[in-house]
Structures are given as structure tokens and as C-alpha cells.
């Protein structure tokens, strides 16, 4: 049995590995960049969903966070976080839970209609801060940035409520994820910023001051300066993944999670290795390579210090519920035996992490992940 | 507030609903069909992953089960199941766990190479039954059905081991999932059966008796008689889903799970309703409609007795991590308010269920789901 296989003797089934040194480096790099720009960093914790990983952010100087659900806000409030934004259009069916949270922490919510603003005002006893969710081009949700009158109207409802404190304009420029070059990302970032500043000026004319919050990992990773922005909310950057690598938001050695998968079969006629590791271990996400191939993950070897560079021209090319199929080069096929381990570098780390109840650090130590559902 | 909204007052966030009467009916229908054919039904429990749902199978007469991992085998062994097949190519990194399981239950494993058979023989102290995993056309994994010599060779290794009892030939005809008509499914079923019977005869010539186990929900739902087959292992049929509906394996009123999602925003210019319900609540699976559109779920209304028929021409057309976007007809758009509930009928119920730690029955009662990772 060779060195690679011996190294992972404790890895007997699909296991989510977390490279702590890389994650901490990613956390610190973004923190320093935010400090240089004088922008407030409020990282999105939905990527890691772990109180223990949250502490690594706190040690780097983070004091305010973003989450995507009331349950996640509750979990991190229990872990001592006192300033939390639920970055999702406010769910009017959870007003009681939100009010309870608002009694304990500084709570920031998102509103995108007059109706939601009014229902929030009526339904809460405790004070909350409110952002207007603005659609600055992604076209998923939010008040369209061109709809200045509607924006002014909702802002005024918030301003006039004794329970709601108006924060400003918040957007998620998720369309940077369709970019496949740093230039395309920074171009979207600039366009989004100009649009938000236009809305900000429109509100200013009405005597309503507004700050600006943006938050996608490609933009926040690739832009040098955050001038004109008050707050950034990236999340994925703690781990990155194959998608971010393809966009150009990170380098290969920034990716901080991988799934260790046993090899269970070899198919010589197809040059394929069959892994114990499928949609329930990785989530069914794919990207398209420049040559048109669809892939479900990159492949690496376990090493004593983490994992190797991506193995050239070898990818997870198909997956079902528990099976992953690796299209291998002749070299990889030849050197791999049934019972060996291969590491899968995920396409979208947030969705992969969401499937697990724990990380394992490289020394085997378990780090719990909250289960929200 | 209208009737529909009042009915689901306890549903405040994305919630996995289980229609018990439908699930029990699906369980009993398959059981009766298996009994009529004189075939042994060993249902796959990876779809529901719940000891409590398992009891509904036991009440219908099921005594042996299929699972997809050692952890799942352990969970159901704890729940009292004594005859378990791990329907995945044996993972040689878990021989110790398998041996421990084999000391407690009647354990059945899958092998698809001489190497795995030999390693299994050497690595176990307790007796296990072994199936040869045969690739009868799906081309995912298994010994190719045409490779009679290799099949004979592996069967002989198993036969000659005092710890391994040779069961026969097992296949998963997963390519029925690419079918979009009952005729296409039954045609694949017949082809698969003929291929397995050819291999069975080839083994017979060598004096090696072999039984036959097949197991995909489309085939098992659509075939009238299982003549020539000894065991069937369908799993998805307990709940069915949009994929099975499109294939024709079930009718709309057989589908037994749905995810209740709050409406958080309306976008009149696009005719879209934004749901709190995305990839972390549904899993990212899609199917293509006959008109070429890609959809991520069907839409229904909550009713007092469960949920309505699928709403015509309304689908979940896009999803991100927590957002789902419904393309609504003018009628649905008009009648729906922010704060209402809509139900999503999942594309692939196994992957959706896998995201939750509990079902809720229609009366709100919680039914725990095991968490394997």
C-alpha cells in the first residue's frame, strides 16, 4: 500500500475535509482588504454554518455577521453573535421568531415591498434595522434599481416607523457568478455600484440618508477598493470552490474544503473510476469547462499536508445519489486501486457543506456543523 | 386571509410534508403486486431514511430491506431489521464495520470484481451473502453482462469461500429514468431481464445456481408480472415525485411528499413569485418538459386533506441556495399574497428528503429522519 493510501487510513467513507490554514488565510485576507478600504465586513455565515468556524472570523476582527434564515440567526446568536443580518426578503410567517430574536441581538432585516414594510412595522414589538433589497441587475429579487419612486415610498414607510431603523440599500450581485473572467466580474461590480449610488442620490434628494451594502464573493475577491460602499457581505470566500476558481476569484491553493471518497470500482473499457461519493455527499452542482464538458468536481490526492494540486484532465463527470464517476487519465487509472481514496474538490462549497453535520480537519479532529432543517 | 392560508398557519418556514395515506397506499400496492408475482420485495430504504416510515412497510408484510450505506444499515439494524442488503459496490475501507454488522444481521453485499471478492473473503470473520453487481445496460457500474467469463470467475471465488454465500445477479436498471413513456420503461425492463437470464444460464452451465434481483421504481411500477425475477428492490415508489410522474410510473395523486414554502415577494413585471425555498430545501434537480422548459418542481396549494392537483402551467423555474422562483399564470399571481404558502412537488424525492431531519404529517406530527453524514 502506498504512502497516499496510508495517509488517509482513518478516512473510511465520504468525509468532508476542512483545510483550516487555508480557511483562516482566506478569512484574514478579506478582513485586511476590508480594513484597507475602510468598509465594514459582515461575512455571510451560511457557507460554513459552524459556531467553531465562526470563532476564526471573530479572531480576525469580525463582529457582525450575515445569515440566510431565522434558524441560522438563532444558532449564531446562541454562539454569542450580537449583530446579525438575515439576508433574505423578510418571511412574514416568522414575525414572532424575528421579534424574539430582536429582543436579544441587533437584528437587521431585508424588505422589498411596502406591504412587507407595513406588516413588519405592525408585527414587531422590538426595534430592528431594515435594508431595502435592491435588484441591481441580477433579476432574482429586490426592488428594481430604476424604480426610484417605489424605493422612496418603501423607505418612507420604514423611516416613519418607531420600530424600524432605515439602514439603506442592499444588493446581491449574483450575476457575477455567470462571469468567467476577473474583468467581467469587476465590470459588473462597477455597474452595480453606480446603480446603487444613483438610488442613494435619489433618496438623498428626499432627505433620506442611505448606506450601501453589497455582497458576492467574486466581486469582493476581485475588486481592489470598496470606495463608495459601506458594507460587504461575501461568504463563500472562506472555502472557495471550483466555481470560484473558474471565475478567477481564487487560486487553486485557496480552496479549503474537499470530500474524501473511497474508490469502489474500476472500469477499464471506459477509463473510469467509480467513487463512493455522489449527490448526497457533494450536492448536484456542475460547471462547464471551456471545452464544453460538464463536470461535477475536480480531483486531487490526499497528502500529508492536505491535498495535491488538481489532477490534470481528470474530473468527476457524472454522479447519481451515492456514485461518482471519475473520467481518469491512463496514469491515474493505472495507479489507482479499488479501496484507494480520491479527493473531490466541490463545484459549490456552500451546498456541499450543507449536507454534513461535521467537518474533519486534516488531523481528523471533528468540527460540528449546525443542521438547520 | 383566505382558507388556504389559514389551513397552514403552523407552517412558517420551508417544511417537508408527508402524506401518510398516500405513502401507505404506495407501500401496499407494491407489496400486493410482488405477492401476486411470487417475487420477494426488498424495498430500498434510502428514499425515506426513517425508522418510523420503515414500520409502515413492516405492517404491509416487508421483512427484508435494501440500504445504500453501512451507516444506513446500522441505523435500520438498530430499528430491528434483520435482513439487509447494502446495494452499493462493497467499500473495502469499511470491512471492520461490515464484519460487525454481519455479526448482528443477515447481511447481503455487492461485489463486482475478483479483487473485491478476495478482499472480502480475507477481511471478514462473519458470514455474509454476496450478489454480483451486473451492468445490464445502465453503464454506471457492475460487471458487464456480456463478460460471462469474468462473471464466472468472480462467482467461483465467492462460491469457494466459507464466509461468502453466493446469492446471484443483481442489477439497477437506472437507465429507465431516461425513459419518458411506460412503453420505453417496460422495453428496458424486458431487455435487462433477458440479459440477466443469459448470464444466469451461463453460470448454470458451470454448476453455479444464481437468483436474480432487479430494482428500479419505473420498472417495478410499470411491469405487470415479475416472472423470472426472484427479488425486486424499488425504493422511490414510497413517495414518487415529478420525475416518476413524467416517466409515467405514478399518477399525480400517488406523490406523497411536498415542501411547503412561504411566498416572500412578487414580481409583477416578470409574473414571478419568489419563494423561501431553494437548493438547500429541495436539492438542485430538474427535468425538461415536453416544450423544452427546464423546471425544478411542480406547484400545488395546501388543502385541508393534503394538497391540490398540480397548478396548470405553473412551475418552479429557477432556484438558488434559498430562493425559488415560480413562473405563475396571471390567475395564480393575482390570488397570491406575500406571506402565503405554496407547495413544491419535488423533482427527485430521495434527494429532497435527504436534506431534512424530520417529516411533518398533515396534522403537524413530526416523523424523524436519520441523518447519515
Image (cartoon, coloured by chain):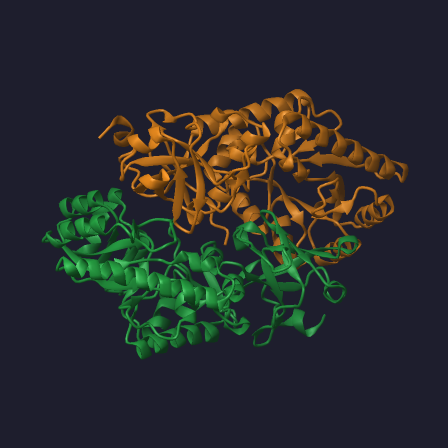
Chain colours: A orange, B green
Q: Position of residue B216 (x, y in %)?
A: 39, 62
Q: Position of residue B355 (x, y in %)?
A: 47, 54
- Residue B65 is left or right of residue A30, and the answer is left
Residue drawn at x 20%, y 42% is B115
**Image position of B227 with respect to A118: above or below:** below
Residue drawn at x 42%, y 30% is A19
Q: Position of residue B301 (x, y in %)?
A: 63, 69
Number of numbered callouts drawn: 0
Q: Is residue A359 visible?
A: no
* Residue A276 picture quarter: top left
Q: Position of residue A361 (x, y in %)?
A: 38, 33
**Quarter that holds the N terminus of chain A:** top left
Q: Is residue A335 visible?
A: yes
Front-most of residues B17 and B202: B202
**Image position of B72 with respect to A232: above or below:** below
Residue drawn at x 85%, y 43% is A148
Amino acid at each position: 500500500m502506498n504512502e497516499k493510501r496510508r495517509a488517509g487510513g482513518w478516512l473510511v467513507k465520504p468525509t468532508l475535509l476542512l483545510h483550516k490554514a487555508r480557511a483562516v488565510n482566506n478569512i484574514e485576507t478579506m478582513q485586511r482588504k476590508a480594513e484597507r478600504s475602510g468598509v465594514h465586513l459582515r461575512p455571510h455565515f451560511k457557507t460554513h454554518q459552524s459556531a467553531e468556524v465562526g470563532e476564526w472570523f471573530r479572531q480576525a476582527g469580525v463582529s457582525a455577521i450575515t445569515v440566510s434564515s431565522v434558524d441560522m440567526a438563532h444558532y449564531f446568536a446562541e454562539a454569542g453573535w450580537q449583530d446579525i443580518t438575515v439576508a433574505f426578503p423578510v418571511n412574514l410567517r416568522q414575525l414572532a421568531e424575528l421579534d424574539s430574536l430582536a429582543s436579544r441581538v441587533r437584528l437587521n432585516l431585508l424588505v422589498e415591498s411596502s406591504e412587507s414594510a407595513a406588516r413588519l412595522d405592525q408585527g414587531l414589538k422590538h426595534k430592528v434595522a431594515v435594508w431595502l433589497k435592491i435588484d441591481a441587475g441580477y433579476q432574482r429579487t429586490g426592488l428594481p434599481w430604476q424604480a426610484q419612486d417605489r424605493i422612496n415610498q418603501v423607505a418612507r414607510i420604514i423611516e416613519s416607523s418607531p420600530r424600524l431603523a432605515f439602514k439603506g440599500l442592499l444588493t446581491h450581485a449574483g450575476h457575477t457568478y455567470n462571469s468567467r473572467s476577473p474583468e467581467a466580474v469587476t465590470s459588473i461590480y462597477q455597474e452595480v455600484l453606480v446603480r446603487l449610488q444613483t438610488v442613494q442620490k435619489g433618496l438623498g434628494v428626499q432627505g433620506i440618508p442611505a448606506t450601501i451594502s453589497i455582497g458576492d464573493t467574486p466581486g469582493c475577491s476581485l475588486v481592489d477598493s470598496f470606495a463608495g460602499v459601506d458594507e460587504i457581505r461575501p461568504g463563500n470566500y472562506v472555502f472557495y470552490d471550483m466555481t470560484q476558481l473558474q471565475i478567477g476569484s481564487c487560486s487553486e491553493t485557496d480552496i479549503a474544503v474537499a470530500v474524501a471518497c473511497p474508490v469502489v470500482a474500476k472500469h477499464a473499457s471506459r477509463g473510469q473510476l467509480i467513487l463512493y461519493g455522489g449527490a448526497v455527499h457533494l450536492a448536484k452542482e456542475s460547471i462547464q469547462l471551456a471545452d464544453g464538458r460538464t463536470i461535477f468536481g475536480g480531483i486531487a490526492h490526499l497528502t500529508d499536508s492536505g491535498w495535491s494540486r488538481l489532477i490534470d484532465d481528470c474530473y468527476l463527470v457524472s454522479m447519481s445519489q451515492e456514485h461518482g464517476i471519475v473520467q481518469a487519465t491512463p496514469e491515474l487509472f493505472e495507479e489507482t486501486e479499488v479501496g484507494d481514496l480520491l479527493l473531490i474538490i466541490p463545484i459549490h462549497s456552500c451546498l456541499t457543506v450543507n449536507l454534513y453535520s461535521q467537518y474533519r480537519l486534516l488531523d481528523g479532529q471533528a468540527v460540528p456543523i449546525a443542521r438547520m432543517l
